[in-house]
Every structure is written in C-alpha cells, then in structure tokens.
Amino acid sequence: MTPANYLVDASTLIDASHRHGETRERLMALLDGGNVVGICPVVTGEFLAGIALADRGRWRQWLEAFTYWDISRSAAIQAGEWRYDFARQGVTLSLVDALIAAVAMDIDAVLVTSNVKHFPMTGIELMSLR
C-alpha cells in the first residue's frame, strides 16, 4: 500500500489514550506503516484540554511521535467559508472541526476521526479506527 498523509482528530487521540477498542493499535499501525501521521494546533489543544496535570508530561511526549502541521492561511479561509456556507443550510459546524477539516484538505490527508458526523464537507476522505 502506498504511504499516505493522515491527520488525526482529537477524538481518535482520546480513544487511543483510553485504549478504546483497537483504536490505539490501529493508530500505531498507521504510524509504523510508513505513513505520515500528524496532528495540528487545534487537535493538540483539544486533546490536552482533557489531560490531568499529573499525566501531561507522558501525553505530551506521546504527541511528539506525530508530524505537526500548522494551520495555513488557505485552510483558515476554507474553514470560515465552510462555517458560513453550512450555516446557510441550517448546519452548525464548530470552528475547531472546520479548521481540522480544512487542514486535512490543505495537506491532502485522510482525516482520522471517531466523530465522522462532525465533518459533512465534501472533498475530504474520512477514516474511523473504531
């Protein structure tokens, strides 16, 4: 299989940190499979917002295994446009989810999430490890 880019959503990181099902094993298989598996600023912030002070060092070190993609200007623009367009259709997108999806689109990555329903945008490939 050809290596690919994978952007991991906080929901998948949370599942993996709680050893939910086989999520952690499947995530590690992506990392070990020669793929580029990464996170972005909002994923990092979302994940660490749920980590107790005593555990932060261990989880911050774990996050170092992932490539880090910043949010580009074009991704920020795309996120804002999606929020506007979907709102006109009666669908509320969170800014966090719109930014994550826009980064995935910007870097041509598969978005790995446990919350597929949060990403109704077209043009983004989604994967759940559950």
Image: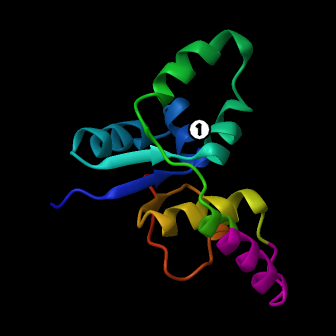
Q: Nearer the viewer, residue 22 or 61?
A: 61
Looking at the picture, which amino acid does disc 1 mark? Answer: Ile
Q: Main secondary structure of the magenta part?
A: helix
Q: Residue at x 77, y 62 (%)?
A: 95
Q: Is residue 24 toward the left or the right of residue 13 in the image? A: left
Q: Is residue 53 above or below residue 129?
A: above
Which quarter shows the N terminus? bottom left
**Percent of width and height locating residue 111:** 48, 61
Label 1 Cα crowd, 10 Å radius (few <14 / some 14-19 / many 20+): some
Please name the colour scheme applied to the rendered image. Answer: rainbow
Q: Residue at x 76, y 86 (%)?
A: 85
**Percent of width and height locating residue 39:** 51, 45
**Percent of width and height locating residue 115:** 61, 59
**Percent of width and height locating residue 83:** 77, 75
Q: Which residue is mark 1?
A: 14
* Magenta-span inclusion, residue 90: yes
Examine the image and state in which quarter residue 89 appears: bottom right
Residue range corresponding to the magenta coloring: 77-92
Tell me the element at label 1: helix
Examine the image and state in which quarter residue 86 appears: bottom right
Q: Residue furthest bottom?
A: 89
Examine the image and state in which quarter residue 15 appears: top right
Q: Residue furthest left?
A: 1
Q: Residue at x 76, y 70 (%)?
A: 93
Q: Residue at x 21, y 45 (%)?
A: 34
